[in-house]
Amino acid sequence: MSGDVFVNILTEHGPWVLLVFYLLYRDLQKDQATRDVVNKNSVVLTELTTLIRERLPRG
């Protein structure tokens, strides 16, 4: 998209367009942060499970 498209959208619809794009961007950032935390927790849980399995006596 060129800059003219954004200018036309802004002149037709006003600052609400910027607000919507900003909110969508912030929502994307929040989703990425949540995904990163969940991935880190998964790695930690996997490592803990591996340590526990290695220390348990095998029958």
Image (tube, grey):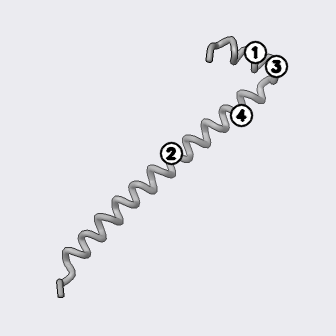
Q: Is residue 50 left or right of residue 45?
A: left
Three-letter amino acid code at the position of disc 2: Gln
**Contact flag, marks 3 and 1 (Cβ < 8 Å):** yes
**Residue behind mark 3:** 12
Tell which circle, 2 or 3, labels the residue nearer the N-terminal end: 3
Q: CA distance from mark 2 to mark 4?
A: 18 Å
Q: CA distance from mark 3 to mark 1?
A: 6 Å
Near mark 1 (Cα within 10 A), the count class, few <14, some 14-19 or many ≥20, is few
Secondary structure, mark 3, is helix
Q: How many numbered discs sit on the rendered protein?
A: 4
| Residue at (40, 60) in percent of width and height | 41
Three-letter amino acid code at the position of disc 3: Glu
In the picture, the disc for residue 8 is 1
Three-letter amino acid code at the position of disc 4: Val
In the picture, the disc for residue 28 is none
Q: CA distance from mark 3 to mark 4?
A: 14 Å
